[in-house]
Every structure is written in C-alpha cells, then in structure tokens.
Amino acid sequence: MATLVTRCPTGSSSLRQRSEYIAAILELSTLVVRRQQRLLHYTSWLYRLSADGRHFARACATVHGFTANVVQRRRQELNHVGHQEWLKGRQGRSMDFIDLLLLTKDENGNTLSDEDISAEADTFMFEGHDTTASGLAWLLYNLAHHPHYQEQCRQEVRELLKGKDVEEIEWEDLSLLPFTTMCIKESLRLHPPVTAVSRRCTEDIAMHDGRIIPKGVICMMSIYGTHHNPEIWPEPQVYNPMRFSPENSQGRSPLAFIPFSAGPR
Ligand code: HEM
C-alpha cells in the first residue's frame, strides 16, 4: 500500500483521498465476509438492491477511482518526460509494480491499457496488504512467546549488519539469515494468513479410499488443516522453527507447507 500512497499528489486533498481509500478497503473486506454469511445476498441483483450492496458499490468506486488516478498521473508523467528520462529518474532505486506494468510491452509492442494496469494494481493491493500484515503480526507474536528464538534471530541480524554503513537488509542478504527464515516459515505454518484456497477439478480425482471427486467440481483445500496435520507435523500446535532445518525438511513433500498455495490456477 505504501507505494501508491507515497506517490499520490501531496497536500491535504491527497491525505483525505488516502484515508478514504483505506476506509473503503476496510469496508470492502467486512462486506465480502458478511455477504458470504447471508444467503439472500448470494443473488447479485438482490445484493445490489440491499444496503450492503450499495455500500459495496460505493466502496468499489472509491478504490477503483483512487487507483485509476494514480495510474493516469504516472502515465502522464511518463509521456511528459519520455522513456529514457523516466528510467534515468528511477536509477538507484527499484521500480515499483506500476512502473513495470507501464513499461511492459508484448512481442508486438503493445502496452497495457490504464484499465489493465489499474485492475492489476487493485488485485495486488488487496491481496498483498492483509496477508503481509497478518503474517508479520503472527511472526512477532510467536517470537515474543519464544524469546530464545527471538534472541537467535537478533544475533543473526546483528551479525549480518556488522560493518555495514546502512542498516538495511537487501534481497541478497536473506540467504544469510537461515534461522530467521526458519522462524518465518514456522510462523506461516502455524498461522497461515490465507487459511484455504479453492480449485476446480480439471479431471476426475481418485481419493485414497477409492471415492472419486468428479471433474468440474470446485473443492476447498484447507491450508490450515494441511499445516496442522499431525501425520506430517507432529505436535502441530507447537512453534518449533527447527522443523524447517535442512535435515528436518528432507523427504517432506513440498505440498506439506503451502502458505502461498501451489499448482496452476
Ligand atoms: C505473507 C504474505 C502472503 C501470503 C501468505 C499470500 C498468500 C496467497 C495465497 C494463498 C493466494 C491464493 C493462491 C491460490 O488461489 O492458489 C494468494 C494469491 C495472490 N497473492 Fe498473495 N500472499 C501474500 C502476499 C502477497 C503480496 C505482498 C502480494 C502483492 C503485493 C500478493 C499478491 C497476490 C495476488 C495478485 C494473488 C492472486 C493470484 C491469482 O491471480 O491467482 N500476495 N496469495
């Protein structure tokens, strides 16, 4: 969320827009869950007529308007300064996702439209903020409950930063934080931010007991259940980062740990 927020126009109107955007995201999250719990709201035209449906439409318009505005401004800036200057201006700092999409071309030189980019931005903003916030919050919670692991992580980070001018961790540094990585993975196992995903079977699926899930059926797969299966994870409720040490990970199916899900969709 930070990227879009910091790049929006400065001044009080942008601050107001920003908090409207955040309020709308929160409202949409509540409304989506509430709709699932109300049978009558399953039918789209009935939902549209309901108070919740009207609030939903308004909040969607706020979110879409905000993103469209950011993309349009960025496009104008790009057109104004030209590709070369634009890239030069971004040297020394990484481009964000909107920059990448603006510059993307297919093999025939076609670029993405503003609508395409807005739709992608809306998706990753929505998918990205709550999962990350919840993953981080649970990690901090688990480390707070296990100060000895917390101390090991701290030592690892101190060791990494020793002798560095800037206290920043780069992408390449992550491989130098093996224990911290194990702690993060164990937290994502114990408290996966996304608890289930759905898939439509593209063929008949035979289960161990001989029953068949027919092609075309949509199944819910429990990430939480997989991560707490005692046959794969003994004492599943215990926070134990050592489960992810190289020795203990050997022979375990990659599908035993699926916080980001797996397979085609
Ligand atoms: C701890 C952090 C995160 C977790 C645990 C997580 C987990 C997931 C899961 C389980 C799915 C569903 C995939 C499926 O149906 O198989 C998903 C989808 C997605 N996530 Fe994340 N995610 C995280 C962070 C992010 C971030 C930071 C972004 C982008 C900024 C992001 C963007 C997306 C998008 C765009 C999809 C939809 C992909 C599709 O079209 O199917 N996620 N994520």
Image (cartoon, rainbow, N blue to C red):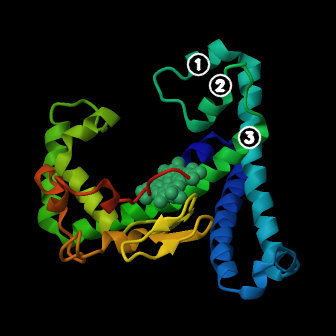
Q: Residue 112 versus residue 51: which sits nearer the camera?
A: 112
Identify residue for label 2: 103
The answer to whether marks 1 and 3 mark residues whose Cβ atoms lie closer than 8 Å is: no
Q: Residues within 10 Å of mark 2 (few under 14, many from 20)?
A: few
Q: Is residue 132 visible?
A: no
Q: In the image, which disc is placed on residue 87? A: 1
Q: Is residue 47 left or right of residue 120?
A: right
Q: Tell me the kind of residue under disc 2.
A: Leu
Q: Residue 246 versus residue 174: which sits nearer the camera?
A: 246
Q: Residue 127 versus residue 226: which sits nearer the camera?
A: 226
The answer to whether marks 1 and 2 mark residues whose Cβ atoms lie closer than 8 Å is: yes
Q: Is residue 154 visible?
A: yes
Instruction: Find residue 189 and report its horizontal and vertical position in percent.
Output: 31, 65
Q: Tell me the kind of residue under disc 1.
A: Leu
Task: Report helix, strand or loop for mark 1.
Answer: helix
Q: Earlier in the sequence, mark 1 or mark 2?
A: 1
Residue at 75 percent of width and 79 percent of height: 42
Q: Please count the marks in the image.
A: 3
Question: Rounded to the nearest whole Å, what is the CA distance between mark 1 and mark 2?
Answer: 10 Å
Position above or below: 87 against 96: above
Q: Quadrant of residue 85?
A: top right
Q: Earlier in the sequence, mark 1 or mark 3?
A: 1
Instruction: Find residue 102 and report its horizontal and vertical position in percent.
Output: 67, 30
Q: Earlier in the sequence, mark 2 or mark 3?
A: 2
Residue at 55 percent of width and 35 percent of height: 96
Identify residue for label 3: 116
Residue at 23 percent of width and 58 percent of height: 183
The answer to whether marks 2 and 3 mark residues whose Cβ atoms lie closer than 8 Å is: no
Instruction: Find residue 151 and report its horizontal and vertical position in percent.
Output: 13, 58
Task: Report helix, strand or loop for mark 3.
Answer: helix
Instruction: Find residue 81 and report its horizontal and vertical position in percent.
Output: 71, 17
Question: Rounded to the nearest whole Å, what is the CA distance between mark 2 and mark 3?
Answer: 13 Å
